[in-house]
Image (cartoon, coloured by chain):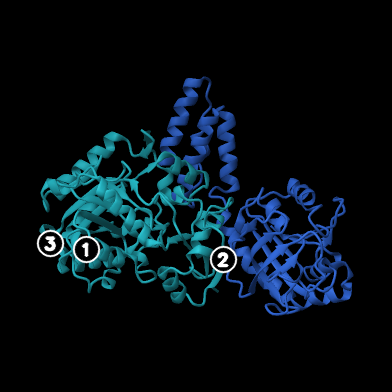
Amino acid sequence: MKYFQPNFSHIYVERGALDYPLSQIALKKFSKSKVIEVDHYKDIFNRTGQDFQVQKKSMKLILAKKTEPFLYPASEMVQEFGTPNVYYNTPILNCLYNCDYCFLQGMYSSGNMVVFVNESDFMDAIKIKMASLNLTLDPMVVSISYNTDIMAMENIIPMASRWIDFVKTQKKLLIEIRTKSALFSLIKKMIPHENVLLSWTLSPEKIAEEFESTAPPFNSRLKSAKEAVEAGWAVRLCFDPIILFDGWFEIYSQFLHEVFREINPSKVRDVTLGVFRMNKDFYKRIKKREPTSTLFYDNYEIKDGVVSIGKKERTESLEKLEELLSEYLPKSKILIWK
Amino acid sequence: MQCILSALKAESDPLINFFKLKKDDSYSFPFYKKNDLCLIGIGVGKNKIEKRIFTFLNDYNSRSLQFINIGIAGGKINNSEKGEIYLINKIKDENSNENYFPDLIVNSNLLEHSTITVDKAIVDGGGDYNCLVDMEASEIYKVCLKRVLVHQISFLKIVSDYMDEDVTSISKKKINSLINEKLPEIDTFLKKYKNLQEFKSSILGNVDLVWISRARSELNLTETQYHQLLSFSRGYRLKNPNKKFEDNMILKVYSKTERNKNFKNICEILSA
């Protein structure tokens, strides 16, 4: 018996968001969904007394119009690619997936998803910012998939492809689309652009099954990443978070071997490495709700507002992995959150 | 536990009979119960809701408690049907203009509608009202939300009239009949809704909690140590669903130093 409503059984639409093309696409896609009008997306998304994990059993879609700010400076927990002009934006709040280690469950009180349909306002904000920056040496980098997985939504709301089209009109803009999706096929027909960085988060099968059970399995993600590399896209591979457990090094060694057996490492733009880490307030908020993932019951240290594995163990583990990775790629291509 | 909230005796009676609920006279208001299901008569309008629900909560407070408001409502001839039952997806309080949105997680197959909660019965045909009209929903939502989460509050409304009859003037027989007709749907909804309760079950079982309580008192743990122990114990239980918390982990200690040493040892075992 199916106990829960399917995802997006209900679509909440802000009055002012209804006529936007992205709203119309979503409403057409889910023509059987119940549409409920709201004054403001926060009336539903920021309600008190929500349970993130219960709502994840039947996510609702909220279509809204974002107001400023449209752009934020990147968090220190993100590898910054050696450029000072790194930003992120939030065209979507929350993710189709629900990985155990994800900070979104601590950031948002709701498990539902908000799609901001006024995409041109986001794009205009980038243009304005670019005009104020000195971009003679470095481009402006914008992560458009920071609080979501925009590619995972591509068959629902084709935002990734629209952002790629936008980048093609901007010379000094690089966007990063980080994903765990297996939907590369949906943008496969587009001509690759050097200023679009497609980043796949990959984890060993054991980790993917235990901590990323709602995301596509490792093999599907690897296949998508491989197709992107072979089609000529700039691809970053994110081995992040690395989860440490008994026998982790052997599992990760085997995993990296599998990855680079499929994907030619010389064709990968770079890779990122990092262990499980989280803003301490998000972590505390999640712990308060008694999460059922074992991840939240390990020994961590809190430093500078970040919860993570102790510095010594973290550094040793990441150095071991860096050594291992350097068999495939030069160290200059390995970005590490230490 | 599931707790039905209904305003009128004529609404409650069919539910009490169907679910074979027994009156509990220890309350000063209508209260009926059988096993994991109970019913509170909350009276018509907003006035008595908070006091009655909070009195009940003094005795029955649990993480998995669910409140279900079941009652009649006025409908609109062009968008609702007399005798039909609706799951409420939006509640507007006419007084404050505030909107409330119940979570709609359970696959109920019921039709849905929004409702507006008014202070006085609408008997003039409803004029500009385009949704159902009731007299309790917004207050129930606000009161219950002080103690439970959004997904633990649901509203089922059966259309009794097209806003042309005062709720107090609708015959008892008619209301009984409206509720009786929809008992199978109500029963199915309650059963499906109950499935959500399992998501609030605690990681630690009663036996685990007894062991933790023993460790706390015998080792005279500080508040911080107690919370750390709870956390490590949850991790241990998740990793070892069938293992016991061994009694011999807790030693007889005679000083804070010994206590701290034993505590550290326990944490290491639990987090291994």
Left or right of A46 in this view: A203: left
Tell me what hue chain B is rendered in.
blue
Q: Please indicate, yes or no, whether residue B36 appears anywhere in the rendered image.
A: no
Q: Quadrant of the N terminus of chain B?
A: bottom right
Q: Quadrant of the C terminus of chain B?
A: top left
Instruction: Label the cyan chain with its letter.
Output: A
Residue shown at 37% from the left, 61% from the top: A119
- Going from the N terminus, do you reach mark 1 or mark 2 first? 2
Label 3 belongs to which residue? A264
Label 2 belongs to which residue? A37
Residue shown at 25% from the left, 49% from the top: A131
Q: Which mark is residue A168?
A: 1
- Report x, y in % for residue B9: 86, 65
Are the two marked residues, 1 and 2, in contact with CB atoms closer than 8 angstroms? no
Left or right of A80 in this view: A61: right
Label 1 Cα crowd, 10 Å radius (few <14 / some 14-19 / many 20+): some
Q: Quadrant of residue B208?
A: top right
Left or right of A77 in this view: B83: right
- Report x, y in % for residue A59: 49, 63
In the rendered image of this protein, does residue B1 appear above or below residue A301?
Answer: below
